[in-house]
Image: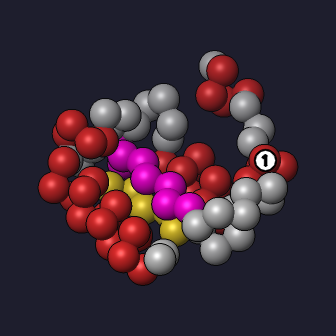
Amino acid sequence: RAVDRFDGSALGARVRAPTLVLGGEDDLMTPPALTRELGRSIPGARAVVVPEAGHMLAQEQPERFFAELESFLITST
């Protein structure tokens, strides 16, 4: 319920750093719609929803997690 009531849309516009927003397709705590919404709210952010992963994305899909992170770091510097 707390996730459903949270509205962070105004917070995203304040972010000025390069940003990668990662979420799992099966995440119940932070559903994919919120991952995408946060990505849209941060100017220039990259949002990625990873299939077959829940809230523990780095543990459930470590290869994909680190590939996305590495790609982001390479292209953001």
Q: Which residue sits at x=75%, y=42%?
A: 8
Q: Nearer the viewer, residue 52 or 65?
A: 65
Above or below 38: residue 18: below
Mark 1: which secondary structure?
helix
Q: Which residue sits at x=80%, y=55%?
A: 14
Along the horizontal axis of the image, is 14 left or right of 26? right
Query: For residue 25: magenta?
Result: yes
The image quadrant of residue 5 is top right
Q: Residue furthest left?
A: 63
Magenta: main secondary structure equals strand
Q: Which residue sits at x=34%, y=61%?
A: 69
Along the horizontal axis of the image, is 51 left or right of 9? left
Range covered by the magenta-colored residues? 19-26
**Image location (x, y in percent) of residue 76:** 48, 75
Tell me the quarter of the image containing the N terminus: top right
Q: Residue furthest front?
A: 77
Counting other residues with Cα less than 10 Å from the Cα at mark 1, is it few (<14), some (14-19), or many (20 or more)?
A: few
Residue annotated with mark 1: 11
Callout count: 1
Query: For residue 62: magenta?
Result: no
Mark 1 is on which residue type?
Leu
Q: Nearer the viewer, residue 2 or 18?
A: 18
Q: Which residue sits at x=72%, y=31%?
A: 6
The image quadrant of residue 56 is top left
**Image location (x, y in percent) of residue 33:** 56, 50
Above or below 47: residue 76: below
Q: Nearer the viewer, residue 42 or 73?
A: 73
